Image: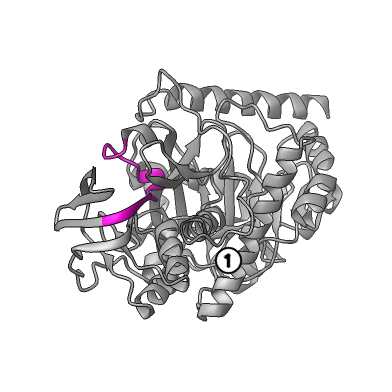
Amino acid sequence: MQRNEVFHRDFKPAPYWWEAFQPIAGDLNDVPVRTRVAIVGGGYAGLSTALELAANGLDSVVLEAAELGFGASTRNGGAVSGGVNIGKSFSGKSLDPRSDRARVLLSDGADAFSLIERLINREGIQCHWKKTGRFVGAWTPAHYASQARRVDLLNDAAQSQAYMVPRERQREEMASDYYYGGMVIERAANLHPALYYKGLLNACRARDVPVCARAPVTGIRERDGGWEVETSRGSLQAREVVIATNGYTGDITPDLKRRVVPIASHIIATEELSPDLAATLIPKHRTLADTRRVLCYYRMSPDGRRMIFGGRARFTPATPAQIAPILHRFMTDRFPQLRGVKVTHCWTGNVAFTLDALPHMGRQANGMHYLLGCNGSGVAMMTYLGWQTARKLAGKSNQPSAFDAGEFPDHPLYSGKPWFLPAIGGWYRMRDALDRGLAAFQR
């Protein structure tokens, strides 16, 4: 398929999810003069923080730099797995799965999954929540063996209901022989990320929480035992400040900026498929991913008519016109039957990685609170860290979160601009190709 034949005649360089909910400025709520808690960032993390603060009788203001829902909260793939992938660092090193810390972190990740479901049910959020599980394809036989060694830990610490699927049974999970088998995680789900965001936003509005669009923060300084937060639309006084900017953390908080690595993740949506073809691709309607270092993730759209396919097409800035053909090729590598299918949407959003691959919440030495670092599990982890941060501010936490402990690492050669991504990305791709080639040779 030629490059120019990838694109549908109605192609849009925008998220497919925006067909159901477009990021909005709303009524441009005035920035209040004062509040108990100023929350910088209006994504899942910020809204979840505000919602739980309201439940505990504490007022807050959410400050969003762009339109409401403009960031990764309406751009992600909509997979929810409770943080079972936490702990594999950007350097490639992994958290020791045998450690007590790994078990506690996985347990908190499982709590994050439960929280999502409680919020959706409590607030009546119509976001196509489906607990259909997740299948993670093994890139090589060695990866399959590594997955098998994790099953007991995931089931014990995170109640993942995980089990292995050998290659000869792989077509029970996907209409392809592309992987060497893989792992099923039954305790996983998918949703419509933009409609989930809309539900959180409506829940905040129902509790009279001011959510201020187009109010980028231009300065934060200590004042009178609290904080003065300056925005492009006025300033406000706050007793506490929470930084919830994740993959869009900027120069206002330079100390935090150099602790998160924003990496663009790219996604395409196909045109509507024939009903017979669509029904066969992922018969159990799971979310799929793989064990590559530069992984891909994919699922069917909530109506089951389109393939939503994501990954890292490039590690340098790229336009949707450049990204879509690359992802289309990745997709047809896995599903040759999709050759000839065209792309209607292509978009990108920032994923926030940390140097130890763990989400972090806490309080800086100057007193500002933060919750950052989704590491690819943003729907669950950002919602959860917002909830935990609010409970901490309200003095209601029953126990400390595992993500509110330990050092939040930085590096002397990193200031917030990920100059090293092209080199590391190229190295990872080469390693993936080498591993795959060796696996094929040894068959």
Region in magenta: 238-253
Viewer-nearest residue: 374 or 313: 374
Residue at 44% across, 66% down: 53
Q: How is the image coloured?
A: one colour
One can see residue 243 in this view: yes
> Which quadrant does the C terminus fall into?
top right
Where 192 falls versus 296 (above or below)? Answer: below
One can see residue 342 in this view: no
View extreme (front): residue: 224
Q: Is 408 colored magenta in this rendering?
A: no
Q: Quadrant of residue 147?
A: top right
Instruction: Judge left or right: residue 69 versus residue 428.
Output: left
Q: Which residue is mark 1?
A: 116
| Image coordinates for residue 10, horizontal then vertical, percent | 33, 64
Kind of residue sitting beneath label 1: Ile
| Image coordinates for residue 359, horizontal then vertical, percent | 54, 43
Residue at 42% across, 46% down: 370
Residue at 44% across, 61% down: 49
Viewer-nearest residue: 79 or 389: 389
| Image coordinates for residue 273, horizontal then vertical, percent | 54, 67
Instruction: Judge left or right: residue 36 versus residue 420.
Output: left
Viewer-nearest residue: 432 or 406: 406
Instruction: Judge left or right: residue 209 versus residue 357.
Output: left
Label 1 crowding class (10 Å Cα cut-off): few <14, some 14-19, many 20+? many
Which secondary structure, mark 1? helix
Residue at 70% across, 62% down: 133
| Image coordinates for residue 372, horizontal then vertical, percent | 46, 45
Viewer-nearest residue: 372 or 20: 372
